Image: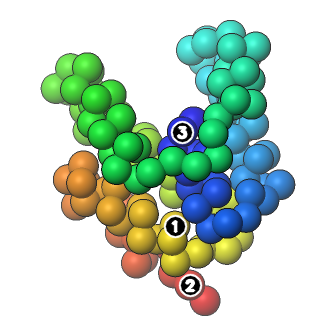
Amino acid sequence: MELGSFFANCDGNFDERESKFLDGYVDKMVQLEQLPKEELEEIKNNLPTSFDIEYLIQETKRMRDVVTDLEKVPLLRTLSYFIHGMILADGVIHPNEKKYYTEWKDALELDDDINIDEYLKQD
């Protein structure tokens, strides 16, 4: 959720569509019985709106390091697609979103994942 909050806010505008995307994520986590809805809602409602991309990279690396080798790439790809969804949620791709997504992806060595230039084109 920290990643979602960061990408929802890094363009300076937390849009209602981004909020709905996060709500959908919470609902999916509840359906998958990952955490109780009340706990997920509390986490979502208490997220700071300001994160540093380096902090998020380090937190993602910590998360990656606690799963098995077989789970590492699927975990990172899942997070990558989540970020991609958050970026597209408001219909506007801000340069900061592209910049920080690329920085996050490169730091985690996801070179073969989503091609940011293909999927996040500015029209």
Q: Is residue 120 left or right of residue 38?
A: left
Q: Residue at x 64, y 57 (%)?
A: 9
Q: Nearer the viewer, mark 2 or mark 3?
A: 3
Q: Provide the residue designation for mark 1.
A: 97
Residue 26 lies, in percent from the top left, at 69, 29
SS at mark 1 in the image: helix
Q: How is the image coloured?
A: rainbow
Q: Residue at x 83, y 54 (%)?
A: 16
User: Do we see residue 11 in this rendering?
Assistant: yes
Secondary structure at numbered mark 3: helix
Name the kind of residue labelled 1 in the image. Glu
Residue drawn at x 52%, y 77% as measured from the top left: 95
Disc nearest the viewer among 1 and 2: 1
Question: Which residue carries the number 2 mark?
Answer: 122
Image: 45 above or below 7: above
* Element carrying mark 2: loop
Relative horizontal placement of residue 120, taking residue 26 as reference (left or right): left
Amino acid identity at mark 2: Gln
**Looking at the rendered structure, which numbered label has been put on residue 2?**
3
In space, the residues marked 1 and 2 are separated at their CA atoms by 11 Å
User: Could you tell which of marks 2 and 3 lies nearer the N-terminus?
Assistant: 3
Q: Is residue 17 left or right of residue 108?
A: right
